[in-house]
Image (cartoon, rainbow, N blue to C red):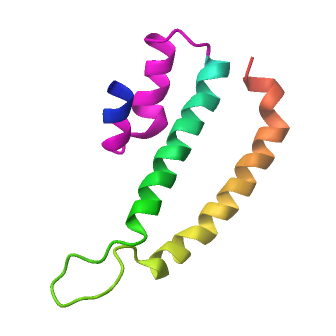
Amino acid sequence: MLLAMGSAAGLGGGTVVFPTLLVVFGFSPNVAVPMSIIIVFFTTSTKSAKEIFERSPEKGKDKPLIDYNLAIIFLVPVIFGTGVGVWINSVTSNLYLY
């Protein structure tokens, strides 16, 4: 129930899901990290699939709820940051994880 409330509130994996998996369920960090990523992925995918077909609540406006132009603007740095993060992880993973 706590995991569902945290995900519904948009708190994500680092704020509610990960500590719950560690403290309540007793998982090790090596198991809790991928599990929290999977939980956040499916929660986000479900919410995004729901909002694709919703319309803007503004009266007289028949436009989608999601601003796709703004999403494209944010997508470029996200893809770049993901690449940089993967590279940093591949270089430093053995130094800091264990």
In the image: residue 92, left or right of residue 74: right
| Residue sitting nearer the eye, 32 or 79 | 32
List x then y, in percent, for residue 23.
Answer: 45, 11
Q: Quadrant of the C terminus?
A: top right
Q: Nearer the viewer, residue 56 or 15?
A: 56
Q: Is residue 80 magenta?
A: no
Please identify the dominant SS of the magenta region: helix
The segment highlighted magenta reads 6-28
Residue at far left of view: 59
Residue 96 is left or right of residue 56, and the answer is right
Residue 88 is left or right of residue 18, and the answer is right
Q: Position of residue 84 (x, y in %)?
A: 73, 54
Q: Quadrant of residue 89?
A: top right
Horizontal and vertical percent position of residue 90: 83, 40
Seen in the picture, residue 1 relative to 25 is either above or below; the reply is below
Up/down of 53 relative to 21, above or below = below
Query: Is residue 19 highlighted in magenta?
Result: yes
The quadrant where residue 48 appears: bottom left
Q: Is 57 or 13 nearer to us in this picture?
A: 57
Residue sitting farthest toward the bottom: 60
14 is higher (above) or lower (below) than 66 = above
